[in-house]
Image (cartoon, grey):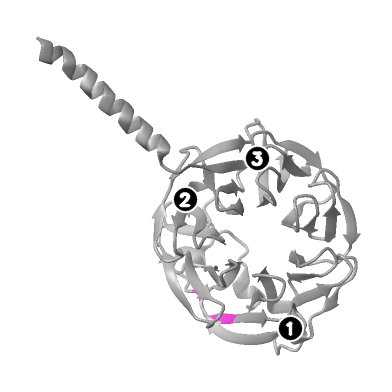
Amino acid sequence: MANRLRRPAFWLICGVASVLSLQAEPHWRIQYIFEQSRSSLTITDLKFPSSRRGIASGIFSDKSKDKPTVLVTSDAGEHWTPVPVKEAGLSLFFLDESLGWMVTESGIWQTDEAGRSWRKISKHKDLLRVQFLTREHGFAVGALKQMLESKDGGATWLPVPAASALSLSPENTVFGAISFIDNKRGFATGWNMPASRRFSRFPDWMDPETAQGHRQLPSLSVFMETRDGGATWKSQVLSMFGHISQVSMAPSGFGLSLVEFHDNFEYPSEVYRIDSATGGSRRVFRDRARAITDVAALGNGGGFMAGFQLVGTVRNSPIPGKLKIYSTDDLNSWYEMKVDYRADAHRAFISAADPEHVWVATDTGMILRLEK
């Protein structure tokens, strides 16, 4: 009888220990989720310039109209405040927790108050991203073969001669990513692709050519590198499948690049580990059923990548897929992390204030924090 009385207590202890073990594993907790009937929130970018302050750009949409907005937090994402803005942000860049820039379809906006107020400083169109080395000195990349430099905080921009000299048609050339390791070493990447192959009139699930197995053809990819803070750039043009949409470099000189594919390609994306010292790269991840949309290389030698589970065999399904997040300690071996079951996405964005404070946002209106 005594043994029978003790046994339930033993199994209870084991069960509690198992639950505590699961809770102790690193996982992703939803901090913010937009849940309003007849309206939606599309997040377009996320930046945490410090462990407490965060900024997300996006668009509130309902049946009447779209309302551009910025969400801001000063308590590490526990509470978010919407700030109305006049133009929808495409991307964000912050030099510190107060000073930042937002790129829109028709210009560049600046904040000195961690996103709580904005003023338009440039009407330069067709840009996609900016990155600043100091308050005054920065670079911008975008469509129409635009790779530009500013020395007055973004008010005026001049073309980077090395990019302008490339023998590529402006109308088909896009610079989509730029990343600096420090104030000297930086990279920019782009691609040249005929408009007829770059975009379809229909998403994959409605496009008969894609549905019948239309194959992607190689296109030209552009690599730009500087080792003197942008005073000079070296360029390289290669033929490859897909295009490099993201580059994230750590202070060590190692980093990650993301290649995304269009049409009915065998894989939706691939991730490469890159070494700035040697210029070498090698593939470290690809999965037929999972599309990666952002990568982040961290100062501790590790990193993250985020994306979504494909819904069936259709690449651009109108139904978002389950959010998938992977972690690495060495930019080589990756393991999948636990994510709140409610999180889904068509695109995900990673922002790390440091290796211990990391967030992921989805275009479906969710923001998650890494819990350890």
How many residues crowd around disc 1 within 10 Å: few (fewer than 14), some, or many (20 or more)?
Answer: many
Which of marks 3 and 2 precedes in the sequence?
3
How many residues crowd around disc 2 within 10 Å: few (fewer than 14), some, or many (20 or more)?
Answer: many
**Would residue 266 be seen by someone viewing this image from the given angle?**
no
Q: Amino acid at mark 2?
A: Lys
**How far across and how far down the image is residue 187, in percent?**
65, 75
Secondary structure of residue under mark 3? loop
On the image, numbered disc 1 is attached to which residue? 163
- Residue shown at 72% from the left, 71% from the top: 183
Which of marks 3 and 1 precedes in the sequence?
3
User: Residues in magenta?
Assistant: 216-220
Q: Amino acid at mark 3?
A: Ala
Q: Nearer the viewer, residue 198 or 327?
A: 327
Q: Quadrant of the N terminus?
A: top left
Q: Nearer the viewer, residue 147 or 105?
A: 147
**Would residue 102 be seen by someone viewing this image from the given angle?**
yes
On the image, numbered disc 3 is attached to which residue? 76
* Residues tagged 1 and 3 counted as in contact (Cβ below 8 A): no
Whether the magenta-drawn stretch holds residue 217 is answered as yes
On the image, numbered disc 2 is attached to which residue? 324
* Residue at mark 1 to residue at mark 3: CA–CA distance: 39 Å
Specify whether 345 is left or right of 87: left
How many residues crowd around disc 3 within 10 Å: few (fewer than 14), some, or many (20 or more)?
Answer: some
Whether the magenta-drawn stretch holds residue 147 is answered as no
- Extreme top residue here? 1
- Extreme left residue here? 1
Which of marks 2 and 1 precedes in the sequence?
1
Secondary structure of residue under mark 1? helix
* Residue at mark 2 to residue at mark 3: CA–CA distance: 22 Å
Q: Nearer the viewer, mark 2 or mark 3?
A: 3
- Residue shown at 45% from the left, 51% from the top: 311
